[in-house]
Structures are given as C-alpha cells and as structure tokens.
Image: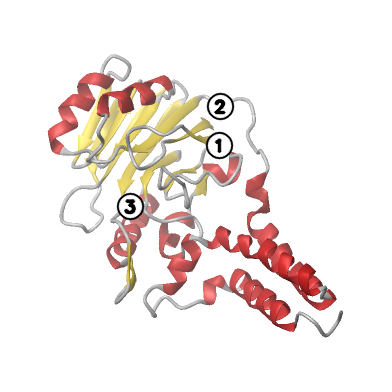
Amino acid sequence: MWRRGIVVAALALVLALLLFFHAEVPNRIVNLGSLLETFLPWLGLAVPVLLALAVVRRSATALIALLLPTVIWLNLFGGLLTDKSAAGGDLTVLSHNVNADNPDPDGTVRDVVAAGADLVALEELPESRVTRYARDLAAVYPYHSVQGTVGLWSKYPLHGVRPVDIRMGWTRAMRAVVSTPHGEVAVYVAHLPSVRVKFNAGFTAGQRDHAADALGQAIAAERVGSVVLLGDLNGTMNDRALASVTSQMRSTQGAAGNGMGFSWPADFPLARIDQIMVKGIEPTSSWTLPRTGSDHLPVAARLQLP
C-alpha cells in the first residue's frame, strides 16, 4: 500500500506546487500565470479526482500526499466558503455589465431597480441605448452620469464627475463623488478590456493589464478617503496583473460574501470578473443577483461608511 499510487502521489505534489507557487508561474510565456490565476479555485476539483484514484489504488502514499494540496487550497479559498455577511451598513451598491447585445434591456432595468441599491453602475452601455436606460432608471435614480460606455446612477447628488483615462483611446472608466447622508464617497466605474485565449497567442491580456495599471494610478491619487470601485475588470482578485488595483483595495466578496461569487459567464459562472472593491469603507455583505438578459450576473454589496 506504500509502493502503490506513486503516480497519483506525484500528481498531488504537482497540484500543491501550482497552488502554492502560482505567483511564480511566468507571464512572459503567453501570460500563462494570469491564465492560471484566473481559474485558480477550480484546481481544487483535482483533489477529489486524485482521491478517488488513490482509493482505487489503495495507496497510503497518495492519500498522504493529497493532504498537501488540500490544506493549501483551503488556506487560499476556504475562507470564501463561509458566510461572512453581517447586519448593518448604510449604502448599497450594485454593478452590472449589461451587455451591448442584451435582448431584454427593459427587463434588465426592472431587475436592477428591484435590487434596491442606492448606487448602480452599468458597463458596456451602447450609445444607442443610453437614453433608454437613463429614462427607465430616472424615477428611482434622479442623479446620473454616463461617460463613454460606463454610467453611474445614484439616489444622491453627484459632483466632480469626469472620465478616467485608462489608455484605451475611448472612455471606459469614470469617477464621481457621491454626497451621501453619511459623507462623501468617491466612486469609480470601470470596464477594463476583454481578454482572450488564443491557440497561437495564449492568454492575450496586454491591453487589459495596461488599463489596470492606469486605473490603479488614478485610484491611488484619489483625495477622498472613502473610495468604491464598481465594474467589470475582466480579471479576478488572484490575477497578479490587477495588482495595481487589488493591492490598495478590498474585495467585498472576500471580506463579506458567502461563497466564491462567480459572475461570468451567466449560464455557468466560472470566475468573478465583476468586482466591487472598497478603500476606507467596511463592507458588511456581498452577493450576486439572479441572471438578467446579460451574459454577466449583477453583483451587489452593502457598505458601512466611516
């Protein structure tokens, strides 16, 4: 029983190395590191597969080796499996990539309004539908601004509204200060460039990475103490390429969510690329909403302002 299952034990050790040293997998080779980190939680599915093989082989060596990737995975993601939401909070925010080709924009607006958020950020707004979204949301959200393909709707007054240059040549990010009853909050809405997996080029994320760096610099220069980032970042909190943003902000899902909070694709969510992140604010709860007409799920969070 000690000599059997050596191959299974070796695979378990490789899995453990990938989980523990994922940050060392180089990006210079077709952005392999970022690709791995995008779907890093899913490596945990290999554990029950290897466990079944170890049992079939009746290998004590493989079973012991499997303890290593199991412990590492739980250390990385186990905290996401528990419910960290709490009561309280005085500001509810929602972010949704509505999809430019959304077949049911009116239904999407109804779902967004029903969520009862104080602030709503929408991404991938086609110019031809901006007026329609603004009209349908106006009754609940009297204050709004659309900059390029992103927009912010609010129950509270906005000022200091401006586009944010994320080095794309057109506007896909904005900043506004919201005057809430509990103080001012700087809100950033962003839609970073899409990434693709191509056979001959690997994980093409260069434009996304440059945009993330520019967004991180803008947030770092923000003078308002309470900051919220809402948007489709086309990347996960594990992706090192988003470090200029993730190093200075907290994910509401990681701090106050229940589960992984995967948001894309809506049919079968595999990754949380739609983010709500905060700085100088305490999240009390975070969740995903049911599917709308978009290929992304809406994400929401309840925040406690200082």
Q: Locate the N terminus by quadrant.
A: bottom right
To which residue does mark 1 refer?
A: 283
297 or 57: nearer the viewer: 57
To which residue does mark 2 refer?
A: 89
At label 1, counting other C-alpha atoms closer than 10 Å, the crowd grade (few under 14, some 14-19, many 20 or more) is many
Which mark lies nearer to you, 1 or 3?
Answer: 1
Give coordinates of residue 194: x percent, y percent.
30, 56
Give coordinates of residue 304: x percent, y percent.
54, 30
Amino acid beneath label 2? Gly
At label 2, counting other C-alpha atoms closer than 10 Å, the crowd grade (few under 14, some 14-19, many 20 or more) is some
The answer to whether any part of residue 223 appears in the image is no
Q: Quick check: marks 2 and 1 in contact, CB under 8 Å?
A: yes
> Where is 210 relative to 174, above or below?
below
The dot on residue 206 is none
To which residue does mark 3 refer?
A: 218
Q: Distance between the residues labelled 1 and 3?
A: 22 Å
